[in-house]
Each structure stands twice: as C-alpha cells, then as structure tokens.
Image: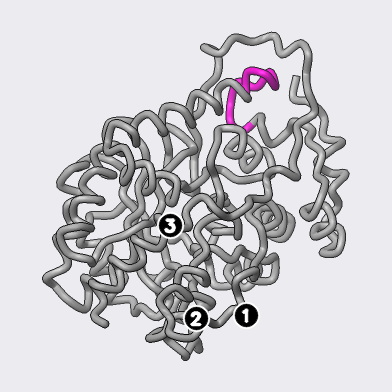
Amino acid sequence: MDRASRKIEHIEHTLKLSSNEPNSFKDIKFVHQSIPNIDVEHVEIHTTVGELPLSSPIFINAMTGGGGERTISINRSLARVAQKYNLAMAVGSQMAAIRDKNERATFEVVRKENPTGIIISNIGSEATVEQAKEAVEMLRADALQIHLNVVQELVMPEGDRTFSGVLERIKDIVDELSIPVIVKEVGFGMSKETATKLANVGVNVIDVGGSGGTNFAKIENLRREFTLDLFNDWGISTAASICEVKQSQPFFSVIGTGGIRTGLDIAKALSLGASAVGVAGLLLKELHDNGEEGLEMTIERLMNELKMVMTALGIRKIDELRKVPLVISGETFHWLKQRGIPTKNYSQRVYPH
C-alpha cells in the first residue's frame, strides 16, 4: 500500500475509535473551594510552551497530511479554525511530503490559510537534520515536533523494525535548529527515564502523548490480516506521564496530550504540571461530523469550560493551577506510588491566595 492510501486508512480508523478509550483524568479530583472570590471575566488562559507564547493552552495537535485532496481539506479547515481562535497547530508527519514532493501541498495549505499563526512541523525520529530543516522550511514553522511511535511501527504491517540511533539524531536536530524542538510520543506515554534521556541530548519540551486518546496499536490492528494484540493495552496514561516527566525534569515544558475531551480534563492536565494540552481525535471527529462550525463550537466549549473550572477554584492564571491542591486516586495513584512519585505533594499544595 502506498503512503497516501495508508494516511486515509488511518483517518477512517481514527474516526471509528476516537472516543472509545477511557482516559486517566477520572482519577484526579480538585479540592473544592467554596469561596473563590473571582469572576469568570477575571480568568486569563494564555500560557507559554518553551519559548512559544500561546493565547490558549489548547492547541490543535498533529493529525494528518500526505494523503492527497482529503488531507488538504482537513488541514485547510483546521488551519482556518486555528487562525480564528489564535491557536497553535501542529501538522501530521511531513515525511510523506519529504519523500514525495507532490504531497507538499497537503501541508503547505496550513500556512496559506494561517499566515501569521503558530505552526508546528512534524517529522519522524528516523529523520535527518536535512529533512528536519526541509519540514520547517515547508511551513515556515515556529517549532518542530519529532514523534516517537515505536509501538505503532511494530504493529503496522509495513512498519519500521529498526530504531537504533534515535537519540543521536534528535541531538543533531536540536543542535542545528534555531526553533524549539518538541519530542512527542504517539499515544503510549512518556516515562521519567525517557525524559532524562531526552534532557541529556538538549530537549526541554515534551508532548507526553499518553494512553487514553487515539490508540495506534488498535488502529494498525484494523489494517492487519492477522491481529497483533500485544500492545492494545500498552502504555502510560496521560495523567501519569505528566507526573513522571515533571518529577524527573521539573523545568521541562510539558504538553499533556491523550484523551483530552473537556475543559475539566484540560484543567487537570495543567494542574499536574502541563503548560498546554494537545487535542486531535476529538477535533477530527467533530470536523468530520459537523464541519468547521461544529469544530468552532467544540473549541469554544473547551475554552469556556476551562474558564469555569478556574473560576470555581479561584484561579486567575494558568500558572496558578499548578499550585492548587488535588487528590489522585485509582489506577493513577497506584502507578505513581509504585514508581516512587509522592502523591501527597499534590494533595497538600498550598493554595495560591
């Protein structure tokens, strides 16, 4: 199967599975504050990720490109909405366009529709410095994602089977590029060990891409003649991944992607230590089902819900969310306890005012 056809298959299967995975945020509960002493209009939701100033912690995460006209249409709509709400947007893997110049238009449409917004390029961990530079040039990108998708490749019928030299390639790209480099897991979470390895090669922004969102092991199994079920329940949840990375590398900027569906999920991810959250599957399904209007309504819902949660907590700014007390229970509590990450550090935080 050619790469473009595979991209379309990924979209179709993602739409089927997009809302079926349980996320980990049910294990996180805020300590209620009966006297918040602020109004909704006092709440500000701008944030920063590394060197990037963002008007909102919500950004449109990597979805697609490289699949002909259908992916042009999807990326055009996503870029329009990103421009309207001044949201950062990442594209899907540009390796397709690097290998087939005919697919460049499926990515370039994003910058055409959003000429002044924050756009994030995307390449695989097999990419060279030259390919990274080409991906950035293609979009005049403000940052670069390098995605890690070992499990997806192992389950993919035509996937890669060689993963040597990844850290060396990432280091070379970080050293050579003048824009922020974000290393992103694709749906299976990030451990503190991985965060330390990345810190050692100069990375300081991670997208944890935790389990609970789009499950690429299940998607690739839908494409296999004989299923490989080893990895269907594999991975570290988004909530646990944020805690793992921040416990290991407290000065990292963390993006909490994986299973974000409500403004409450966003607030919980930010309170655990994320600086922003990436949303992909939810937005792709909304665009497919209800068009750009539905996509806009979903973006507005997420932002309004986040502001309401922050109001209930008496929080005016995103940074203050990382100081409010919360209680961790369930599977997330047991995971963190076994991993030596003290959960009382979250439940006994001092309220910021």
Q: What is the magenta segment's predominant secondary structure? A: helix
Query: Does the magenta-highlighted stretch encompass residue 313?
Result: yes
> Residue 181 falls in which quadrant of the image?
bottom left
> Closer to the observer: label 2 or label 3?
3
Tell me: residue 62, above or below residue 200. Answer: above
Q: Which mark is residue 16?
A: 3
Tell me: residue 165, above or below residue 274. Answer: below
Kindly identify the residue that appears in the image at 58 percent across and 20 percent down. 308
- Rounded to the nearest angstrom, the CA distance separating label 1 from label 3 is 21 Å
Residue 205 appears in view: no
Report the residue marked by disc 2: 155
Kindly identify the residue that appears in the image at 55 percent across and 19 percent down. 43
- Rounded to the nearest angstrom, the CA distance separating label 2 from label 3 is 18 Å
Q: Position of residue 40 (x, y in %)?
A: 56, 13
Q: Secondary structure at mark 1?
A: helix
Q: Which mark is residue 230?
A: 1
Kindly identify the residue that appears in the image at 18 percent across and 55 percent down. 72
- Mark sitting earlier along the chain (1/2): 2
Q: Position of residue 131 (x, y in %)?
A: 28, 75
Q: Quadrant of the C terminus?
A: top right
